[in-house]
Image: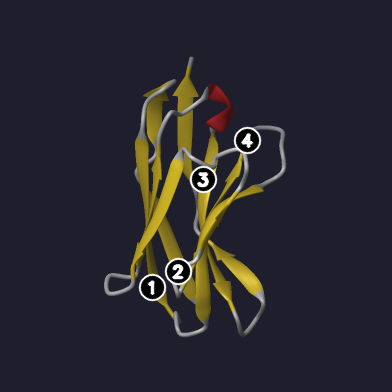
Amino acid sequence: QVQLVESGGGLVQAGGSLRLSCAASGSLFSINAMGWFRQAPGKQREFVVSITNGGSTRAADSVKGRITISRDNGKNTVSLEMNSLKPEDTAVYYCAGFSSRTLSWSWGPGTQVTVSS
């Protein structure tokens, strides 16, 4: 099993920046990609950004140019830097790890990000 714990959420004004971190532990040998998803009130969880073990990244169009994902394989951490935040970025942000063995995502409990206008 994989355990993921997010940190760094909070309240920020529109136009501001925020950095989220995710610490991973447990059976990480099958995890070949890490990502961030978010869920706004009344909406479905949506993909934000991902990074493979090889460093390839993919981001949703809604956040391209405003976010940077990075990982530290030695520390088993993944970070998400978000800039030029908008009120519509308000959501619970979830760290996730994709297993090549189960072909499924494991999830952290989430961290709230609130962007005030």
The mark that comes first in sequence, 2 or 4, is 2
Q: Which residue is mark 1?
A: 25
Which mark identifies residue 107? Answer: none
The mark that comes first in sequence, 4 or 3, is 4
Local secondary structure at mark 3 = strand
Q: Which residue is mark 2?
A: 3
Coordinates of residue 116 in the picture (x, y in percent): 46, 18
Residue neighbourhood size for the residue with mark 1, other residues' Cα within 10 Å, grouped as few (<14), some (14–19), many (≥20) = some
Q: CA distance from mark 4 to mark 3?
A: 9 Å
Q: Which residue is mark 3?
A: 93
Q: Which residue is mark 4?
A: 40
Task: Name the amino acid type tagged 4.
Answer: Ala
Coordinates of residue 63 in the picture (x, y in percent): 55, 40
Task: Name the amino acid type tagged 3.
Answer: Tyr
The mark that comes first in sequence, 1 or 3, is 1
Coordinates of residue 97 in the picture (x, y in percent): 52, 67
